[in-house]
Image (cartoon, rainbow, N blue to C red):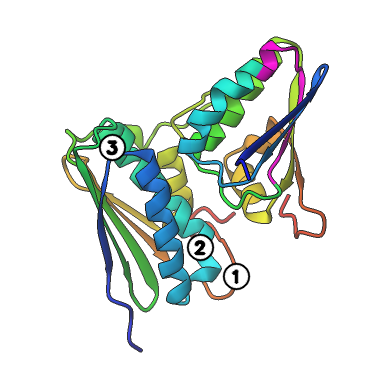
Amino acid sequence: MKYPAPLRFKMPSTLAAVDESCLGVKTWLQDNGLENDWFAVLLLLRESLNNAVIHGNRNDPVLDVDCELRRGRRWLSISVADSGAGFSWARAKKHRACCRDTCGRGLEIYQLYADEVVFNRRGNRVLLRRQLRKGGECALNSNRAK
Amino acid sequence: MPSIQIEQSENQALIQLQEPLTSALARELRPRLLEVIAKGATQMVMDLSLVDLVDSGGIGLLIATRNSLAKVGGGMRIVGASSEIQHLFQVMRLDRHFEVEGKPGDGSLS
């Protein structure tokens, strides 16, 4: 089976650019037979782009966010990098928002919807891998499905 | 068609969204919802029938609005949520704090 070429793009650090990029990726998912899992993939993509724009590049439109989506036989990966100073992802991964918190849920969404979450040492690049599901399910990762 | 429609009658408000409830939309919507509460709304219904995705920024807006309504003794109900959005709210434990209704005929996971 031949897989589509990776989808690579650069975008300015604005939330409007996140919306626009996600629209383009939705079309790419449909064109490549991934429409059944679009909710989870687009949610992961949005969270990673939002984090890069807001926390990484501090909404500075001059700074770019780099993104790559790659489809394999059983996996789809999303790689997002910003130009920021990075963050202490090991500490942040342990954080869980309480019911009244109005922010701080992005990393929890990574952990729920991605099967693998890998940050570079600096914390300004994240790689999210999601196992492709058969059929129209929007399942959580296998460790979280219960 | 505007992406946000707001109807208010005395202490009741109906908010209809027509695009994904994302961080970008949340920034636009937050002051408008605060204005609705300032005008006396205590019971809010958020209609997500035309919304296919909610991100963490959208979730933050829903929580902030619920917190603001709680301060005036009110509450919020979410209606028309797709099965994917209901699933997200469930795994993020939001269904403990909101009354969430699905779309009629949509397979609910809750």
Q: Chain of mark 3?
A: A
Residue at 43% of width from left, 48% of height from top? A19
Distance of label 3 from label 2 (alpha carbons): 26 Å
Co-location on one chain, circles 3 and 2:
yes
Q: Which residues are magenta?
A: B36-48
Residue A105 appears in the picture as rendered: yes
Q: Quadrant of residue B63?
A: top right
Q: Secondary structure at mark 3?
A: helix
Give neighbour class at mark 1: few <14, some 14-19, many 20+ (Cα, 10 Å): few
N-term-proximal mark, 3 vs 2: 2
What secondary structure is found at the residue carrying circle 2?
Answer: helix
Which disc, if any, is residue A136? Answer: 1
Query: As displayed, is residue A138 above or below residue A136?
Result: above
Label annotation for residue A38: 2
Q: Which mark is on residue A43?
A: none
List x then y, in percent, for residue A43. Answer: 47, 51
Chain identifier of the residue bearing label 2 in the image: A
Image location of residue A20, percent across then percent down: 40, 51
